[in-house]
């Protein structure tokens, strides 16, 4: 099996979707869930599933990204992952860190990239009057929310949508899209997955 490390900062619903998909004839298995927030709910949900967890709090590093990443690298290297999935990991990674894992690191972003890189994607889609929105899984390259697209899922924007309602509709699709992309990627198939 390919070994998958998952990095998160929050509740970890995408991590749960990925972990729960890695059973049976799936070519990968989870080896580590790692967070920059020791209190992330996702760590508890991973531990409940019997997965090794670790946390490296970014706050003591006060913006010294290379020093933070040097600590992050320790449990990650020890876990010997073949693939890293960023799943709601809310720290920007340096080019050096990304280069180390180039071609092996995936991210899910809550917009139809190249639209709405960065934060507040749902509010921005609503403000723009878009009729559809969605999520993207892409390979991580040094530029933020850039890199080859491995899959997208689309949802309609509906009358009366708030950022929260729209986010929930997108998140449901994230939970379908990310496992579908990981399954292909772990089988060395980089053909993009398009849903919705
Ligand atoms: C997801 O919507 C993910 O796409 C987004 O954070 C959420 C994490 O939810 N990621 C980003 O915004 C990355 N910049 P989860 O912890 O329940 O998976």
Image: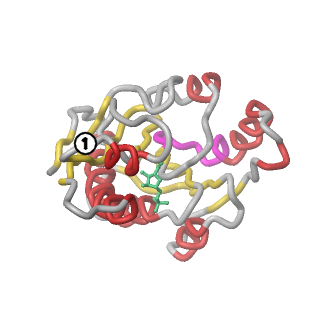
Seen in the image, is 183 located left or right of residue 70?
left
Residue 30 highlighted magenta (yes or no): no
Q: What residue is drawn where x is 64% and y is 23%?
A: 96
Magenta residues (range): 76-84
Q: Position of residue 185 (x, y in %)?
A: 31, 39
Task: Return the residue nearer the eye: 165 or 46.
Answer: 165
Classify 10 Å Cα crowding around label 1: few (below 14), some (14-19), many (20 and above): many
Q: What residue is drawn where x is 25% and y is 44%?
A: 129
Residue 78 highlighted magenta (yes or no): yes
Identify the residue position indicated by label 1 in the image. Answer: 152
Q: What residue is drawn where x is 59% and y is 56%?
A: 9
Q: Position of residue 73 (x, y in %)?
A: 69, 39
Q: Secondary structure at mark 1?
A: strand
Seen in the image, is 150 located left or right of residue 43?
left
Q: Position of residue 154 (x, y in %)?
A: 20, 48
Is residue 6 visible from the viewing direction of this image? yes
Seen in the image, is 171 located left or right of residue 37?
left
Most distant residue in the left direction: 196
Is residue 22 visible from the viewing direction of this image? no
- Whether 104 is drawn above or below 186: the answer is above
Task: Return the residue nearer the eye: 195 or 97.
Answer: 195
Q: What residue is drawn where x is 35% and y is 62%?
A: 162
Task: Return the residue nearer the eye: 14 or 74.
Answer: 14
Seen in the image, is 69 located left or right of residue 175?
right
Residue 76: quarter of image: top right
Task: Return the residue nearer the eye: 95 or 18.
Answer: 95
Q: Position of residue 147 (x, y in %)?
A: 40, 26
- Whether 151 is drawn above or below 96: the answer is below
Residue 95: quarter of image: top right
């Amino acid at each position: 099996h390919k070994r998958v490390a998952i990095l998160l900062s929050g509740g970890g619903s995408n991590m749960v979707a990925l972990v729960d998909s890695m059973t049976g004839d799936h070519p990968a298995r989870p080896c580590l869930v790692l967070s920059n927030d020791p209190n992330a709910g996702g760590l508890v949900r991973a531990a409940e599933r019997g997965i090794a967890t670790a946390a490296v709090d970014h706050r003591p590093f006060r913006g010294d990204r290379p020093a933070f990443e040097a600590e992050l690298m320790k449990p990650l290297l020890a876990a010997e992952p073949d693939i890293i999935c960023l799943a709601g990991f809310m720290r920007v990674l340096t080019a050096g860190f990304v280069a180390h894992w180039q071609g092996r690191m995936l991210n899910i972003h809550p917009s139809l990239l190249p639209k709405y890189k960065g934060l507040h994607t749902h509010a921005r889609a609503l403000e723009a009057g878009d009729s559809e929105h969605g999520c993207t899984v892409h390979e991580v390259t040094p530029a933020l929310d850039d890199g080859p697209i491995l899959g997208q899922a689309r949802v309609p924007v509906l009358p009366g949508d708030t950022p929260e309602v729209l986010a929930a509709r997108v998140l449901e699709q994230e939970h379908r899209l990310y496992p579908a992309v990981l399954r292909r990627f772990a089988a060395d198939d980089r053909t993009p997955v398009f849903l919705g």
